[in-house]
Amino acid sequence: MKLVVTGASGFLGREVCLAALRRGHEVLALGGSRAPTIPGVAQARAFDLCSEAALEALLLEEFPHAVVHCAALPTIETCLADPARAKTLNTEVPKKLAQLCFHLGAKLVHLSTDTVFDGVAGGYQHTDQPAPLNLYGETKAAAEIEVLRYGREHAAVIRTSPIIGNSVGGDRGLHERLFASWKEGKSASLFTDEIRQPVEASNLADVTIELCERSNLSGIYHWAGTEAMSRHEIGVRIARHFGLEADKFVRPISRGEVPAATTRPRDLSLRLHPLAGKLRTPAQSFDEQLAQLRVPRGCEDWYEQETGRKVVRRLEKGVDF
Ligand SMILES: NC(=O)c1ccc[n+]([C@@H]2O[C@H](COP(=O)([O-])OP(=O)(O)OC[C@H]3O[C@@H](n4cnc5c(N)ncnc54)[C@H](OP(=O)(O)O)[C@@H]3O)[C@@H](O)[C@H]2O)c1
């Protein structure tokens, strides 16, 4: 199958390209400002998705069987920094992609987020109504409507949770951001009453490719790991996994102590059915996710001093991790 992957220079998009290659597909990897460098991907380029005419020309020329759309402004902060760009990239681009995929008869797998919910009830089902609390959630919720308007039969929307994993730059995964603070001598203050359900990047990537392969699966789905827990517990388990003293590196705080927390949903736990029953890719426990994490690049010396453990520096097919 020929796949176009957007956001391929980003955290998840890179993993999606690697998953597609593992499963024997041909990949055109699109970055935004940077051409992705991914081992095994023959076709990769920088490409501004906000240029509608260029996007149309590209897809008509490439005529892919499927598009996995990972490009986005994927945080509350980046959306607030440039609201116009957030609306274009997070809502208008997926709408255009859905129109084009409908025209081409291609499958569209669109990445959405748990942040479309307000976090009041938790345990969200795929049929629950979005009620975003912030601009990021609003732009992604609006995209879901547009994608399904044009792609009810051939588009799949995956709402997912905070992604953990090893990123190339060593700064995108949850544990990598914690390590960056720890290395600076700062403990991380994490909410004991904000609930998330982390997912590992390569597992989520496998799901996106399986959805490309399964023409009968369309509509909105939820995917994450199997365990919902507080951000504080996530931090504690990451610290312990690496043999670090949790009490020293992770500080518990409650949402009541931070006024800005009101724009952050409290409980974004997701129910994974019906998708979990339909795929070969299994949802992972948090321990299975932790087992894949490595000491981030640039933190090895600090880590070795702190724990006395030796870190194996890795080279991944020419990419220095
Ligand atoms: N990360 C999470 O924890 C999380 C949680 C839930 C849902 N999601 C969703 O998962 C998806 C992937 O997130 P991510 O964390 O992998 O994002 P990311 O690492 O920030 O990557 C974003 C990608 O979008 C590209 N991009 C930005 N502007 C572009 C433009 N104008 N034209 C083309 N490409 C552009 C970037 O390219 P350059 O960097 O080359 O400019 C980059 O490749 C998003 O839809 C996000 O909403 C993420």
Image (spheres, helix red, strand yellow):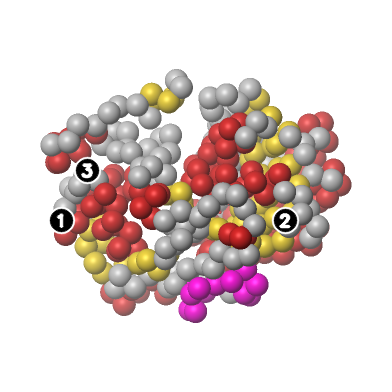
- Which residue is farthest top? 318
Image quarter where the C terminus lies is top left
Is ligand 1 less than 8 Å from the beta carbon at label 2? no
Mark linked to residue 248: 1
In this view, 65 is above or below 81: above
Which numbered dot is residue 4? Answer: none
Q: Which residues are magenta?
A: 118-130
**In front: label 2 or label 3:** 2
**Residue at image x 35%, y 67%?**
230
Which residue, given by chain and number where applicable, does mark 2 sit on? 217
Mark 3: which amino acid? Lys
Q: Alpha-carbon neighbours of circle 2 within 10 Å: few (<14), some, or many (≥20)?
A: some
Report which quarter residue 296 is drawn in.
Answer: top left
308 up-or-down from 241: above or below:
above
- Disc 1 C-beta below 8 A from ligand 1: no
Q: Could you tell me if the residues under marks 2 and 3 are in contact, i.e. CB atoms within 8 Å?
A: no
Image quadrant where residue 285 sits = bottom left
Q: Residues under labels 2 and 3: Cα distance? A: 44 Å
Q: Is residue 6 left or right of residue 217?
A: left
Q: Main secondary structure of the magenta part?
A: loop
Residue 275 horizontal/vertical position (percent): 62, 60
Q: Is 148 above or below relative to 101?
A: below
The amino acid type, in three-letter code, at marker 2 is Leu
Can you tell me whether the CB of the residue at mark 3 lies under 8 Å from the nearest atom of ligand 1?
no
Is residue 179 something one can see in this rendering? yes
Secondary structure at numbered mark 3: helix
